[in-house]
Every structure is written in structure tokens, then in C-alpha cells.
Amino acid sequence: MAIHEECGVFGVYSKEITNVADIVYYGLFSLQHRGQESCGIVVNDDGVFASHKDLGLVSEVMTHDVMEKFPKGRIAVGHVRYGTTGGNERRNCQPIEINHKKGRLALAHNGNISNAAVLRDELEEDGAIFHTSSDTEIIAYLVTRERLKKPSIEEAIASAVKRLDGAFSLCFMSPTKMIAVRDSNGFRPLCYGVFPDGGYVVASESCAINAVGARFVRDIVPGEMLVFNEDGMKSITDLCGTKERSSCIFENIYFARPDSVIDGVSVHDSRIKAGRILAKNAPVEADVVVGVPDSGLDAALGFSLESGIPYGIGMIKNKYIGRTFIAPESAGRTRLVQMKLAPVVSTVKDKRVVLIDDSIVRGTTSREIIEMIREAGAKEIHMRISAPAFLNPCYYGTDIDSREKLIAVSHSTEEICKMIGADTLAYLPVESLKELANTDKICTACFTGKYPTKIFGDTRKDRFDKKLSEL
């Protein structure tokens, strides 16, 4: 699987002064699947911000020594990142921190601003100087500019986000408040919960709320702003309903953790349903159903339940391989996918195997997985994909920014089947996607090309990483 989601955000507002950095640490650890390039935590120590950000996994960056240096406080925000705008550099780590005339601000962002290039050109013409190549800094600049004119931070944010197109689930921290905002389309998830003592937590997914001992309350409504301060929580809904809801369906298919609930729908149940739909629409005679770890497992179970074909553990994932795995020079003789996945021979040998995965992007990984299972003795391999074929780039928070990277753009299903070495291949029908989310208010642009927002100018991931020769 070669698709990556941009990031995860997490914020804490405590009723008492406590080790809020520790709470954010556990929250980010639960959101690690959303981004493995970098992470950061910012703690509000009575109006003074203390932070640490760097490239790496949460456990690598937030070491014991680092965590001990964080002061106690009442508010903290954190972020895990996989960059969809801007390179993998320390300067692009979040949360972004701003010092301005009226105080301080920290911002964590999940999503991708589709009109970022237009806004950045406008701001630079007006004298703005940018220090990162991330679209998140554009949001921070707009909010800061508005804050100088508005009487409160929430009014400044409300004014600034009206300029934004695309996906943004945001968590802000000011000296006295934590503020969460979800874009009016609701592209990316964002939810909140409460602690037993009355404190609050905001997270990209409900799994992170559960992980820190808080109680999940609800998803933040598209367009809604929640303001947390010493008076409690206030909901501002002025921007709700101003755009048609279009939540990313790939959150249900792949991005989110199975134990999360997004917009009232269990991610696990969505994937079970996808497997059932595949079994109905693309049945096959087989002996065992196998899922590619991790995101193909639930759909494989659904396929098994619907078809009556036994479910089997046919592949094992090496849980100790992460972004820090460095291949030796001899890696050319050993496929890297074999370091991450291994077939269970007793499950697949002499069997007709239904192999379930969440997507095919370039086809390389699928081909290598199928080769492994054949080498383990499988007689037949019938590939089933719990999503439709990718035909279009995404501008709302994944790293597919061009059609050239998508195998289904230039090859038919039959051709792809032959290229990856499967006996048969079938995708989830596009028209069934609404069943996964229990609504038709979803974004299917990567499958259908029907974008919910206007797409502006240059949309490349590295559009703000210009070389001197390009200036």
C-alpha cells in the first residue's frame, strides 16, 4: 500500500495544571498510523509555550529525556505528520508556533488547502515571509493577520477560514483557549471527548480519545468551531451548512484505525461491509479468504462471512518494521516487501486463495505479495480490492498528486490482473461506497473525478519547495 494520509492532530484542555504533554504523547501514539514522518508537542505554561518537534516516530522524537523537560500546564496540542504539501524537513514539523502583537498561537492541521498556492502568492505580494513549505503556515498567517483586527482569537479564526478551500481539521492553542475547527465539507475527521474531571480532548480519531482515558462525546460537525476555556465549551456553527458535506470515504476504507468511529459510523463495520459487497459482486470458488495486513483484514472477514469461504491468517506483518528500517546495499537481492510481510504456508499451500487488499496504486506491491503467496504453494489467487480503482489525484490530504502514478489510469482491470499475476481481479463498485459511510455525502473524487471544491493552479506536493533556478 503506497498511499499516505497527511497527519493527525490532538489537543488537551485540562481543568487543572498537570502533565498535559504526557496526555498528548499517548494521544499521538494512538494516531501514529496517520503520519510517520514527524511529530511535535507544544505545551502552554501559563502563557509561555514550550515545544519539541522533530522528524521521526513519536517514540523516537519524544524520548524520556524530552518528555521530562516539558513543564506542567493546562493546554497542549500535538501533531503527527505525513506531508502532502511541503517536503519531509524539520522546518515543516507541526504544530506551527506564532508570536504576534496580541500573544502566541500554536496550530496543528490535518488536510490540504487546495487554494494554497493562490493564497500564498497573495500574501507574499503583500509582504509576508514564509519559513516553511507547508500550507499550514498559510493558515497561521491568515489567522494572525485577522487577530490583529479582531477582538478574540475565535473571531479571527472564523474570519480566516472563510478564505480557505479544501480540507482542514484544525486544533489551535492560544494562551487561554483551545479551539478546534473542521472545514465545512468535513473532508477529514475531528472529534472531541471529556475527561472524568471535566477536562476536554480533541483528536483526529476517537481511538486516541479512548487511549487517554477520556469519554468520546461526538464528531465535530463540518463547519463547526469548538472553543474550550475556563468557562467550559462553546460551539460556534456559523459556517455549518455553507458547503455540501463531502467526507473522505477513504478514511473508512484505509486511513482510520478500525476501532475508531467517524461521523457516527464504525470503521470496522465499514470494512466488514466492503468485504460483504465484494463477495456479492465478485464471487469466486475458493478455499480460503486472506487479508493483506492491516487494512485488508476486516474486509477479508466480511468477504468470508458473506461467501461462506473460511477466513484464514495467510500473511503475517513484521510489527517491528517502521520508517527507520534501513535496507542494506544487498537489498536488490531481497524484496523489501518480504521484510514487512510473510505468508503463512499452511494457510495457503495447495489452496485457492481470495486475497483482499484496500487498494492498488502502482501495482508493484500487489505483484510482490502475489508472488510470495504463489511461492508458498497457492494454486489460485483471486485478488479483491475493497475500494474502486484509483483514477484521479487527491487534493484534500493524501499524497497522490498526479494521474501518472496510478496504474488504473492507463491499464484495464484485465491488464492489471495480468501485470500483478492474479488469476482474477475485481474492485469495489463505486456506487456501493455510500453504503460504507451510511450516506451519499462523501468525497469520491479519487475514483470518479468529481471534486467537491474548485481546484486552483499548481497542486504538486512540492509546489512551495522551489529551487533557485525556478525563481
Image (spheres, rainbow, N blue to C red):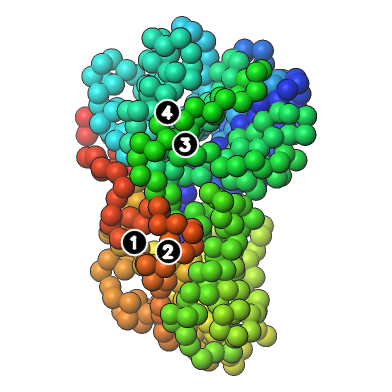
Q: What element carries label 1?
A: helix
Q: Earlier in the sequence, mark 4 or mark 1?
A: 4
Is 405 in front, or is 5? 5
Check disc 4 and report the residue beneath it.
238
Position of residue 146 relative to residue 391, above or below, is above
Sequence-wise, the earlier of marks 1 and 3 is 3
Q: Position of residue 2 (x, y in %)?
A: 45, 59
Image point 65% across, 76% down: which residue? 313
Q: Name the residue under label 3.
A: 182
Cα distance between the residues tagged 1 and 3: 24 Å
Query: Are circles 1 and 2 on residues that touch, CB within 8 Å?
Result: yes
Residue 425 lies in what quarter of the image? bottom left
Q: Distance between the residues labelled 2 and 3?
A: 22 Å
Secondary structure, mark 3, is: strand
Q: Counting other residues with Cα less than 10 Å from the Cα at mark 3, is it few (<14), some (14-19), or many (20 or more)? A: many
Q: What residue type is labelled 2?
A: Leu
Label 1: which residue?
Answer: 447
**Helix or strand or loop: what does disc 4 sit on?**
loop
Q: Identify the mark nearer the N-term, 1 or 2.
A: 2
Which quadrant holds the C terminus?
top left
Q: Tag 2's secondary structure?
A: helix
Crowding at mark 4 (Cα within 10 Å: few <14, some 14-19, many 20+): few
Q: Disc 4 residue type?
A: Asp
Query: Amino acid type of disc 3?
Result: Arg
202 vs 245, left or right, is right
| Residue 252 image offset from top left, x and y in percent | 51, 57
